[in-house]
Amino acid sequence: MRLRRLVPVCLLAALVAVSVADARGVDRRLISNKADGIVYALPKQSPFKVEKASVEGLTFKGRAVISGTYVFGRNAPAAEEMHGSQEPDLYFIPDAASAALLPRWKEDGVIDGVYISNRDDFFKAVIAPGMVQKVKAGKVRSLTGPLTIEVEGYFATVICGMPAYGTRFVRVATPPQVIAANRHAETVSCKG
């Protein structure tokens, strides 16, 4: 019982929160993660709440339905070599209304993309297996399309001076569209 009381106190000690409005007038709560020294902005209308602070970043709990564009594809060869990644990226680029709900790094208010942690679940719901294999084999460079999805949980961190975000896909909220492209996917963190 005593440990249950101590956990919320420790979490509060690890965070310092201040309310501010950004240039667009959106109310945000600034959260200073004492564990990693990074300040994050949490929109007041966000369905996400801080669950855990650590040196890896902030973990949030909550669910949201977000709209935007998904991208599954290979990065340009130079980016893959620089980052040591041979696996195609899967990320979601939220539209402005959805981005206004998401926590972010205070220093860079733009969310270039949110990585999907449970890729296989996303693939089963959105992309035909044959198309996934074509991207993995390099026969198609990338797949993209507009989509509305429900997500659960959220993670925010800063790696090599660039923000990185992640979430878990729950379900498709609108019928997916798949557009094959003969261009590389963009790298959404550690741009070089």
Image: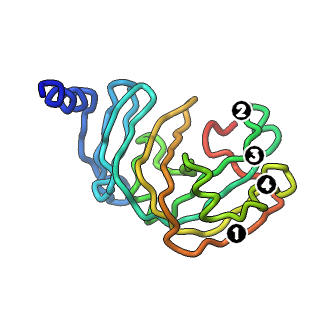
Q: Do the residues labelled 1 and 4 touch (CB within 8 Å)?
A: no
Q: Are marks 1 and 3 in contact (CB under 8 Å)?
A: no
The type of residue carrying mark 1 is Val
Q: State the CA–CA distance, disc 2 to disc 4.
A: 22 Å
Q: State the CA–CA distance, disc 2 to disc 3.
A: 10 Å
The secondary element bearing badge 3 is classed as loop
Q: Is residue 59 left or right of residue 148?
A: left
Q: Residue at x 76, y 57 (%)?
A: 142
Of labels 1 and 3, earlier in sequence is 3
Q: State the CA–CA distance, disc 1 to disc 2.
A: 27 Å
Q: Mark 3 points at which residue?
A: 75
Q: Which residue is drawn at 59% across and 57% down?
A: 122
The secondary element bearing badge 2 is classed as helix
Q: Mark 2 points at which residue?
A: 83
Of labels 1 and 4, earlier in sequence is 4
Residue 157 location in percent, x, y?
A: 47, 36
